[in-house]
């Protein structure tokens, strides 16, 4: 029953997240979309940060069912609020297949950037706790490091969105990959302070990648008329989930075979090459612009 409930939760999250991003894109002009998408990413970060703490307190105080009851009540309230306050934005268009959006200009690059941003977040999870433990941090210290990374990432997301509106999505995404690359280099160093700093820097760089891709996916949707926001952000979610799924497996395997330092250097090289390529492209015709 718990497994089925967890699966249902995943389906619900995918539906509400894809529809929520599509709603943001369809109700905000391109010149403001980066800022608003940044706040949406920030909300995710704070939810991820606060959720475990609140649920743990509720479970200790009122039993293990309490967190589920609270989330169920919040979900019902959210559904009612959407029905009351969120009106139709336009006549519903005909459903657009994912393959149609995936064949749009620059779709492959956007899928790759989204997966890279998500992978940067998940890459550290199976590798760096053991690395930090070997450097002398206990369980509480390691938890605080990852909590700080989530907090600063959540704070960086709105800034990334504002920078996207000001300087363009491609430039900010390139900056994010380079910041993440620097963080990966620090993560693998045999010095606790450097490694801790690296975890936080990688989390910040990931948000600098993900906020611009949210804007660019909206531009990709608008290459289809009427705009296929739902299909485009469903594609975004698939890419994001793929990054979250593949990165820990790749990181854990590479760390066993080559060690933590070599693994983080390889991740840094991939991120840096991606950023350099984005900066050196002279004709971004294949990348949607906002």
Image (tube, rainbow, N blue to C red):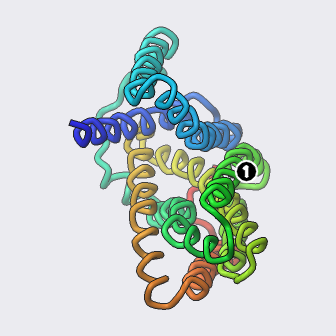
Q: Is residue 178 above or below residue 74?
A: below
Q: Is residue 110 above or below residue 33?
A: below
Left or right side of 270 for 10: left
Label 1 CA crowd tier, 10 Å (few <14, some 14–19, many 20+): some
Residue 2, located in which quarter of the rendered image? top left
Q: Is residue 157 above or below residue 113?
A: above
Identify the residue shown where x is 65% and y is 75%.
184
Foreground of the two, 145 or 152 = 145
Q: Quadrant of the N terminus?
A: top left
Identify the residue shown where x is 52% and y is 36%.
56
Foreground of the two, 228 or 194 = 194
Left or right side of 165 for 77: left
Estimate the x, y position of residue 93 in percent, counting from the top left.
35, 30
Identify the residue shown where x is 24% and y is 43%.
3
User: Residue at the bottom extreme?
Assistant: 258
Residue 57, located in which quarter of the rendered image? top right
Identify the residue shown where x is 75% and y is 67%.
197
Residue 27, located in which quarter of the rendered image? top right
Residue 282 visible in rendering: no
Estimate the x, y position of residue 61 in percent, counting from the top left.
51, 25
Estimate the x, y position of residue 90 in percent, counting from the top left.
45, 22
Question: Residue at label 1?
Answer: 152
Q: Which SS class for mark 1?
A: helix
Residue 93 visible in rendering: yes
């Amino acid at each position: 029953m718990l497994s089925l409930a967890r699966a249902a939760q995943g389906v619900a999250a995918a539906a509400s997240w894809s529809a929520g991003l599509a709603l943001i894109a369809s109700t905000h002009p391109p010149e403001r979309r980066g800022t608003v998408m940044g706040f949406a990413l920030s909300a995710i970060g704070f939810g991820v940060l606060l959720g475990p703490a609140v649920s743990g307190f509720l479970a200790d105080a009122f039993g293990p069912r309490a967190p589920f009851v609270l989330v169920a009540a919040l979900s019902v309230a959210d559904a009612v609020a959407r029905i009351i306050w969120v009106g139709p934005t336009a006549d519903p268009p005909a459903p657009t297949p994912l393959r149609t959006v995936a064949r749009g200009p620059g779709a492959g690059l956007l899928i790759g950037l989204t997966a890279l941003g998500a992978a940067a977040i998940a890459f550290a999870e199976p590798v760096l706790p053991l690395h930090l433990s070997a450097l002398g941090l206990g369980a509480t210290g390691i938890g605080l490091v990852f909590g700080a990374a989530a907090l600063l990432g959540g704070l960086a997301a709105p800034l990334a969105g504002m920078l996207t509106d000001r300087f363009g999505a491609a430039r900010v995404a390139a900056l994010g990959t380079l910041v993440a690359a620097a963080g990966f280099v620090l993560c693998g160093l045999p010095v606790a302070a450097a490694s801790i700093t690296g975890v936080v820097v990688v989390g910040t760089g990931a948000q600098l990648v993900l906020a611009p891709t949210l804007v660019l996916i909206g531009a990709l949707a608008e290459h289809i008329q009427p705009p296929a926001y739902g299909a485009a952000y469903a594609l975004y979610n698939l890419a994001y989930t793929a990054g979250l799924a593949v990165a820990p497996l790749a990181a854990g395997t590479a760390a066993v075979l080559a060690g933590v330092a070599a693994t983080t250097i390889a991740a840094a090289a991939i991120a840096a090459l991606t950023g350099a390529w984005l900066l050196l492209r002279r004709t971004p015709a294949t990348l949607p612009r906002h």
